[in-house]
Image (cartoon, rainbow, N blue to C red):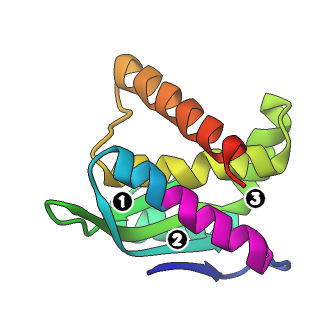
């Protein structure tokens, strides 16, 4: 089951219709990497919440756009994906892209981590970006 949870934010991120499309998209992208989807919890929050999570669980003292906790098994992805809407909005502004585009990129970024994609080196970061773009193209083609 894919859950969308809103915590420490003032407005709703999705309509019911878009949630359904995003769920189908996530399942389709995961299947493209050979995975079924188990329980995936997206927690949409503000900068302060993601900073607290980053400090508590990762020992990092900085803001970020996404933190992925991976509970996947061999063939099924599962996890908790925290997304700071504040940082997504800032990134969208800096990149000159619509907020919705950046949010979808970050949503699928977490899924790609669950499928085993890393982004710590310049090479793996470039590969991650290419995979994000491929996934975004799939989303645009979906009804």
Tag count: 3
Q: Which residue is mark 2?
A: 52
Please provide percent x and percent y for residue 77. Answer: 30, 63
- As measured in the structure, the alpha-carbon distance from the residue carrying label 3 to the one carrying label 1 is 21 Å
Residue at the spot 41% in from the left edge and 59% down from the top edge? 68
142 left or right of 128 in image: right
Quarter of the rendering containing residue 78: bottom left
Q: Are marks 2 and 1 in contact (CB under 8 Å)?
A: no
Compared to 71, does 39 lie above or below?
A: below
Compared to 111, does 132 lie above or below?
A: above
In the orientation shown, which residue stands out farthest toward the front?
143
Label 3: few (<14), some (14–19) or many (≥20) C-alpha neighbours in 10 Å: some
15 left or right of 140 in image: right
Q: Which residue is mark 3?
A: 86
- As measured in the structure, the alpha-carbon distance from the residue carrying label 2 to the one carrying label 1 is 10 Å
Name the foreground residue: 61 vs 110.
Answer: 110
Q: For the stretch drawn in magenta, what is the main secondary structure?
A: helix
Name the foreground residue: 25 vs 109.
Answer: 25
Q: Mark 2 vs mark 3: which is more N-terminal?
A: 2
Please provide percent x and percent y for residue 138. Answer: 60, 41
122 left or right of 105 in image: left
The residues colored magenta run: 15-26
Q: Mark 2 vs mark 1: which is more N-terminal?
A: 2
Label 1: few (<14), some (14–19) or many (≥20) C-alpha neighbours in 10 Å: few
Q: Which residue is mark 1?
A: 59
Please provide percent x and percent y for residue 15. Answer: 80, 76
* Residue 74 visible in the shown view: yes
Quarter of the rendering containing residue 5: bottom right
Name the image quarter holding the N terminus. Answer: bottom left
């Amino acid at each position: 089951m894919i859950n969308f949870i809103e915590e420490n934010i003032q407005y709703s991120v999705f309509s019911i219709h878009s949630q359904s499309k995003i769920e189908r998209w996530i399942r389709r992208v995961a299947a493209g990497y050979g995975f079924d989807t188990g329980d995936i919890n997206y927690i949409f929050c503000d900068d302060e919440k993601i900073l607290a999570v980053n400090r508590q669980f990762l020992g990092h003292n900085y803001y970020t756009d996404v933190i992925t906790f991976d509970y996947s098994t061999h063939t099924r992805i599962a996890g908790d994906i925290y997304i700071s809407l504040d940082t997504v909005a800032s990134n969208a502004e800096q990149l000159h892209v619509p907020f919705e585009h950046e949010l979808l990129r970050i949503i699928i970024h977490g899924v790609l981590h669950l499928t085993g994609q890393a982004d710590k080196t310049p090479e793996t970061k470039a590969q991650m970006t290419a995979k994000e773009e491929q996934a975004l193209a799939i989303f645009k083609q979906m009804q």
